[in-house]
Amino acid sequence: MNLFPVKMHNRYGYMDQHGNVVIEPRYHYAKEFHNGIAVVWPYKNRLGAIDTTGRLLFEQGIGGDKNWANDFYDNLCLVTEEDYDGYETFYFLDMSGKRVIDIDYKSIDDFSEGLASFAVRTLGSWDPKFGAINTNGMVEIQPEYDYLGKFSEGLAMVKINEKYGFINKSGRLVIQPAYQQARNFSENLVAVKNDNKWGFINKSGSLVIRCMYDNVEAFAQGYAAVCRNAKWGYINTKGEEVIHTRFEESTSNYKRNFSNGLAAFSKNYRWGFIDKNGAVVVEPKYTEIKPFVNGLAKVTIENDYEETNSYIDTTGKTVWSKTEDRYSAYNFDTDYH
């Protein structure tokens, strides 16, 4: 069953794909389901997790003046607690809520493909070095890189002497650091930047799509969003422009990747969705949007006084909607609890 979080009367619950509330709003805050598990806050400083039946897997106190928990990745949930002085403590919980990995590093990322990158301060330097631990908390890749990204499709981006390359899970450098910037692999290709322009290479390090774009996003469903002269369009994995670069740039950092066959676009500071032919399916009328997941997308229309949060389907039909005044609509979606 696909469930989606909804907020009603300042409490969170879940609806199904048809807009029927199936888990009553009882939580202080509730995140989206990820692999059948959702992280919830029954109360402000009580953290828990539920399955799609609403069964509580665990509930426990959580410390810090502010706190946050990410989704479960590789069956582990990263928790951050921040005290009044801004000092952060990190640890991982397992599916039963047991604290299984305590983190004594400057920062730590979520697990991805069995590894999580971390940063440590080095003696005599303010610049951290990055390595990775496994799901047992053991160091798998020594902290010797200026940066280490998430593993994706078996490879992770690393920074060495101001240049970016890629390592495998053994820590072996498989693509030499030769790029100004780089991102994560998706659909066997990865975006890289040279001479201030973006293109794509494959896992052998061969340039597949030459560096000619001002900005790009990762491939999804066979298409990648590309930007040239402040206009966005789409290319396929052969580098062919399948949707002309005609959609306007935006200050909002929303992803334009295709999901469920639709991608976001902006016009006059509003957002809508297009299909793979570039045809407008959902008119640009929303101030905030999220990508389609399991057939629905969360969208928002707001003005100085009110905020309307809705879920729409892939035809643009509203499945669920609620309007609140801006003050009561304020919640903790953005940062900490």
Image: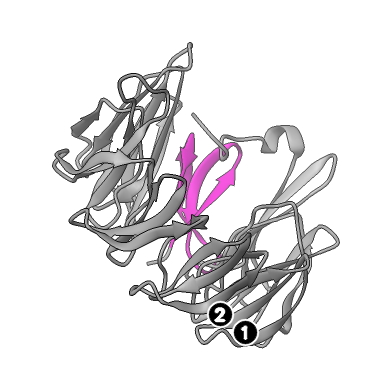
Q: Residue at x 30, y 28 (%)?
A: 105
> Is residue 24 on the magenta stretch?
yes
Q: Residue at x 25, y 45 (%)?
A: 76
Is 38 left or right of 289, judged from the image as shown? left
Q: Which residue is mark 2?
A: 261
Where is 303 relative to 176, above or below? above
First to last magenta residue range: 3-32
Q: Please name the residue that numbered disc 1 is placed on.
A: 276
Residue sitting at x 55%, y 50%: 6
The spot of residue 24 in percent (x, y) is 46, 47
In the image: residue 173, left or right of residue 134: right
Q: Is residue 63 above or below residue 109?
A: above
Q: Are marks 2 and 1 in contact (CB under 8 Å)?
A: yes
Would you identify the image quadrant in which residue 39 lies?
A: top left
Q: Amino acid at mark 2?
A: Gly
Position of 53 with respect to 252 (left or right) is left
Element under disc 2: loop
- SS under mark 1: loop
